[in-house]
Image (tube, rainbow, N blue to C red):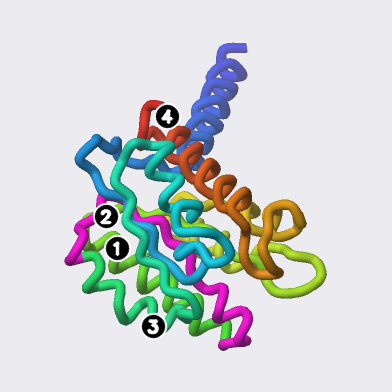
Amino acid sequence: MRSHFRLLCVFVALAVSVGCSEEKPQLSPLSQSSTILAFGDSLTYGTGASKRESYPTILKQLTGIKVINEGIPGEVSGKGKARLGQILKKHQPDIVILCHGGNDLLQKIDTNKTINNLKNMITMIKESGSEVVILSVPRPGLMLKPAPFYEEISTEMDIPIIAGLLSEILSDRELKSDTAHPNGKGYRQMAKAIADLLLERKAINQLN
């Protein structure tokens, strides 16, 4: 009986250790003097809504923390990678919200190039001392599903991800301005989801 009990204890200990290893990546706490960098293309810029309705503007209101909008409409991931270094040096953010690759999908750029560009951007962000959260972008088509490589990148590089949000928003006529962009209501949902993730991962303590 004792040997069976000891064996059971070993299995329990292994189960606990596996569970701990699968914990979601947490984020460092932010303060009122922290900076969040929103980096991406038109989805970050806020195309389809007014500037005051863009998700970075709403995220600032929800968190009470400075949020810088560095979205450029039409930008592909290669050009994003090329300008990211200077942006990181200029703003020295604590956390970067990375939403990129949508134009690559629209222009049917080689997927491996997009993946490598996103990985390089994440590496640059980490090496600068910042943390990163990535948003997945849906593939164009009738059934809007997130491109699977975003989840793969998130797992491989151990970073938080918001996976199906944009697919849900762009599937709802009341939340989008066109087939590729949210409207004001949609961008508010983006901001709320990001703020909720920051709250869940202990980066912030409360929402405004």
Amino acid residing under circle 4 = Asn
Residue stretch in magenta? 89-109
To which residue does mark 1 refer?
Answer: 125
Residue at 48 percent across and 40 percent down: it is 197
To which residue does mark 2 refer?
Answer: 130
Amino acid residing under circle 3 = Lys
Q: Earlier in the sequence, mark 2 or mark 3?
A: 3
Label 1: which secondary element: helix
Estimate the spatial distance between the alpha carbons at disc 1 and disc 3, rounded to whole Å: 16 Å
- Residue 53 percent across, percent down from the top left: 50, 52
Task: Check residue 88 for magenta coloring.
Answer: no
| Mark 1 in CB contact with mark 3 (< 8 angstroms) | no
Estimate the spatial distance between the alpha carbons at disc 3 and disc 4, rounded to whole Å: 35 Å
Viewer-nearest of labels 2 and 3? 3
**Left or right position of 6 against 128:** right
Q: Give above or below for 7 relative to 92.
A: above
To which residue does mark 3 refer?
Answer: 79
Q: Nearer the viewer, residue 163 or 65?
A: 65
